[in-house]
Image (spheres, grey):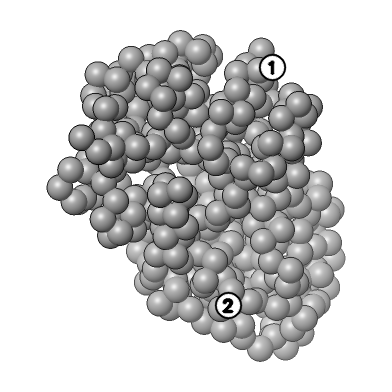
Amino acid sequence: MDKQKIVHIANDYSGSTVYKNLIGELNNLKIEQTVYTPVKTARSIGKNKIELQSGSEIIYSNILNKSVDRIFYRLKVKKILTDIESKVDFSRVKLIHAHTWYSDGGVAYLLSKKYNIPYVVTVRNSDLNTFQKYLLHERAFGKKILENAKIVVLIAASYKSRVLSLPSLQSIKKELETKIQIIPNGVDPYWIEHVRKKEPPKEPDNIFNILFIGKFSKGKNISALQKAVILIQKEGRFKVLLHIVGGDGNEMQKVLQQTEAFPDLFKYYGKVYDKEQLLQIFRSCDIFAMPSKHETFGLVYVESMLQGLPVLYTHNEGIDGFYEENIGEKVQGFSIKEIKQKLENLMLNLKHYTIPTEKIIQTHDWTLIAKIYQKIYNS
């Protein structure tokens, strides 16, 4: 029997629509695939499920927990390995795609050794900023995962130099460099269908509407952004209003307290899932700002630019490095003073930023991205 099937190992399939969009487009290309996703709670079962062609399936397996599996990495890998072998017939598998370096890649590496099946591995934010940073004793294993992968996919262009400069990977640096392919995430087709060119800059006396969309976590740096806006207002040089969309996270209470304390500075929407409502919010704003400390990619930056907004983003994270054009301002540290300065630069120089709309559409179209993966799988 010919080996036809692609197996995706994706710990976070139920937590992100990124995977759903990719799997859906690969399905449109008639690629037979099994998506295996181990989950922590029964509530995650069925999330982001889509209808696939005959022979393809999504397997949700409620085998993980929030305590032990976060601490004992190798036990987690072994648990997933045992479970996936009981649910997938690897005699028909042509290739494995591990969608994270450590959590998924560790399983793919062991499966590859046992069944002699090639694998592709994707490196994400949590891999570099959590696993590689803190699991010092697992760096040798992490090296083996990348060393034996056929292709190493990086979602963010800025991650290439970071990966290649890691001390634990120096002995395989030259080989690794030949394997790396930078493939960004796509954007929901809705934003491409409703693209808007950059609007003319406002008159100086008008209020500058700044937008934040995201989780209220320390990583997204929303509290510091709010404090920067408060400082701008105190100095009186600009009139500003920060539109806040999102919720949850460890800074939820702090964000809401500041919102209540300064109702003239902050407009809070809560979580917004309706795309038409989000579209109107985007179009009511002049700037998008999310000075995240860590970001694998950050599709919300792309959605913002497709609505003509210059962006405040982070050096060496997310979209940094993808576009040569002057798409906005980036912060290198995370001080309130620096965020404030970059926001003021954005407000002063709105007409000088360039949003390469056509290039963004080409780069982040899931249909085109799926075809890139198809070539990788077939090779």
Which residue type carries mark 2?
Thr
| Residue in the image at 52% along x and 46% along y | 215
| Residue in the image at 43% along x and 78% along y | 194
Q: Position of residue 59 (x, y in %)?
A: 25, 33
**Which quadrant of the figure contains the N terminus?**
top left
Of residues 374 and 87, the one nearer the viewer is 374
Q: Residues within 10 Å of mark 1 (few under 14, many from 20)?
A: few
| Residue in the image at 24% along x and 19% along y | 86
Please tell me whether residue 153 is drawn above or below residue 21 in the rendered image. Answer: above
Q: Position of residue 226 (x, y in %)?
A: 68, 54
Q: What kind of element bears circle 2?
A: helix
Of residues 124 and 298, the one nearer the viewer is 124
Ranked by sequence position, the earlier of labels 1 and 2 is 1
Residue extending farthest to the front is 1
The answer to whether residue 314 is seen in the rendering is yes
| Residue that numbered label 1 is attached to | 136
Q: What kind of element bears circle 1?
A: helix
Quadrant location of residue 173? top right
Please tell me whether residue 304 is drawn above or below residue 228 in the rendered image. Answer: below
Q: Residues within 10 Å of mark 2 (few under 14, many from 20)?
A: some
Pointer 1 with pointer 2, Cβ within 8 A: no
The answer to whether residue 253 is seen in the rendering is no
| Residue in the image at 84% along x and 65% along y | 235
Residue 357 is marked as 2
CA gap, disc 1 and disc 2: 42 Å
Residue 141 lies left or right of residue 114; in this view the side is right
